[in-house]
């Protein structure tokens, strides 16, 4: 009995998420500009689902009352690029986000550049 109810919880979560996900979610509706360039938004989609339940036994409960459970999910849609198609049929992919590795290296570089100033402040506050 509990397996059937758990399966139903998961199925309901997946069906609900599927309603949100269509091709317009990750490949957006093309937009045509006045100069004839077509712009198509491209997104990354992350989906998470969690489900859990318990089949507990109690003498006071009937067969249909001994299951408790729940499920939930989440969707994250992040724009990552624009695909442009010009009238001369040239195509270009324009990224929206910075490469995470480049962003991390930039932060590390910034932190390293600040070390002399931080050490100077520590030295001045101690002495």
Image (cartoon, rainbow, N blue to C red):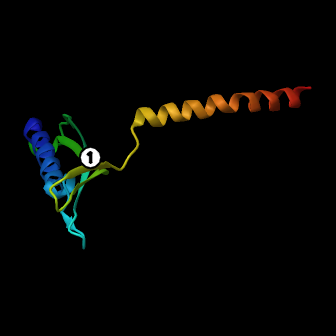
Q: Quadrant of the C terminus?
A: top right
Q: Quadrant of the N terminus?
A: top left
Name the foreground residue: 79 vs 82.
82
Element class at badge 1: strand
Q: Is residue 108 left or right of residue 38?
A: right
Q: Residue at 22% across / 43% down in the picture? A: 69
Asked which quadrant contains residue 84, the reply is: bottom left
As drawn, the residue found furthest toward the bottom would be 34
As drawn, the residue found furthest toward the right would be 127
Q: Residue at 24% across / 52% down in the picture? A: 42
Q: Position of residue 119 (x, y in %)?
A: 77, 27
Name the foreground residue: 18 vs 63.
18
Q: Position of residue 65 (x, y in %)?
A: 15, 45
Q: Which residue is mark 1?
A: 44
Q: Position of residue 85 (x, y in %)?
A: 19, 57
Q: Residue at 10% across / 35% down in the picture? A: 3
Q: Is residue 91 above or below residue 59?
A: below
Circle 1: is it few (<14), some (14-19), or many (20+) Cα within 10 Å?
few
Q: Is residue 77 left or right of residue 103?
A: left
Q: Is residue 123 above or below residue 21?
A: above
Q: Position of residue 15 (x, y in %)?
A: 12, 51
Q: Is residue 46 left or right of residue 13?
A: right
Name the foreground residue: 21 vs 24.
24
């Amino acid at each position: 009995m509990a397996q059937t109810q758990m399966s139903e919880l998961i199925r309901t979560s997946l069906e609900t998420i599927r309603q949100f996900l269509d091709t317009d979610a990750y490949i957006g509706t093309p937009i045509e500009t006045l100069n004839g360039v077509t712009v198509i938004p491209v997104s990354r989609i992350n989906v998470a689902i969690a489900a859990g339940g318990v089949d507990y036994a109690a003498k006071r409960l009937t067969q249909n009352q001994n299951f408790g459970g729940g499920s939930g999910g989440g969707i994250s849609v992040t724009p990552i690029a624009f695909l442009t198609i010009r009238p001369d049929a040239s195509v270009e992919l324009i990224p929206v986000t910075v490469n995470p590795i480049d962003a991390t290296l930039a932060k590390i570089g910034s932190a390293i550049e600040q070390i002399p100033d931080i050490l100077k402040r520590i030295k001045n506050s101690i002495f």
